Amino acid sequence: IFVCLVLVLYQLLSAKVHPAIAGFLVTALIAIPEMYAYSFMALFDFPNAVYFFLAAWFLSRFLSEEHRGDLLMAAWMMGIATYIRSETLILAFLMLPVFFVAGRKLVFKRTSFIGAVIFLTAAVLAYLLSVTVYVNLYLPAGYEISRLLNNNLLNLESLAARFAGMNRELIFSSHGVEYFGYFIFLFLLILLGDALATRHWNLQARHYLYGILVIYLGLPVIGFLLPLMDLEHSTKRGMFKLFPLMVLYMGNCGLLQRLSQRLDTWSEITAVKDRRTF
């Protein structure tokens, strides 16, 4: 899974930006300390992040080109991600608004509802089979999911505390640098530069930004609903899902695409000079 992720990401990025930039972005992803450690450990968080990334990528392709096969692949990948970690179903529901947005307007069409249902089908089935059926009907010992839920949903202070804790302890802190290096700061720097230099994002970049926002806001919500998902373990590993989407955004942002065009022009000029010299 790790090797395939690297190859797929490099291929996708090379189609958008100069190979040198694509190589740098993939290397920056590989260099994330905590995520790299989970790339060779037999735990579920890394595969969950990879399949969520694939679901988001196929969904973006469907929303851009409207090929039914991309929607089916997005649904299948999200189903696998949900089977690996069942709480991913909440993030799948949070992805649904993209089906009802056209440009800057909300559009409620029959095809939008059908697309949203198809996208969720595999994830819901994976949850029902792996949790409702397997846990409740197959495991010999009782395992009540209701005991894991937060019983005081009206107390939003814990939600705010979880959101603040994720930012304070896992992102903007020395621990965050130990876990994730400077990758998040690289993304924020390019995001700010892109906002100032281009002042607009193409359709794919907007899709990836929305996916990043879903994870960034969704992880505290999941921690609020399921208190056993603590910051230092479950939420930290859940943040792995951010990084492939951040790489895709940077590969589709106007700032790096402009830099890529300049590198292509410089390469062509250099090649012409070399031929003349020869």
Image (tube, rainbow, N blue to C red):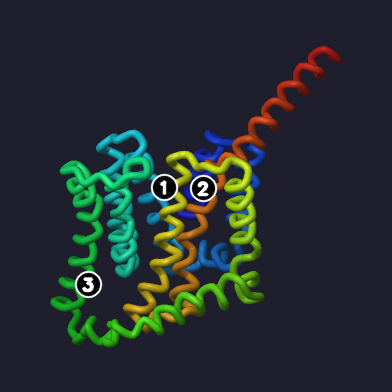
| Quarter of image, res 91 | bottom left
Name the residue carrying label 3. 131
State whether residue 237 is above or below residue 259: below
Residue 249's mark? 2
Q: What residue type is labelled 1?
A: His
Which residue is found at the position 28% from the left and 57% from the top? 79
**Residue 62 x, y percent position in the rendering:** 32, 40
Dot 2 lies on which element?
A: helix
Which of these two is toward me, 38 or 55? 55
Which residue is found at the position 63% from the left and 54% from the top? 28
**Residue 260 x, y percent position in the rendering:** 64, 35
| Quarter of image, res 234 | bottom left
Dot 3 lies on which element?
A: helix
Q: How far apart are marks 2 and 1 (CA)?
A: 9 Å
| Position of residue 83 in the picture relative to residue 257 (left or right) | left
Name the residue carrying label 1. 207
Q: How far apart are marks 1 and 3 (CA)?
A: 30 Å
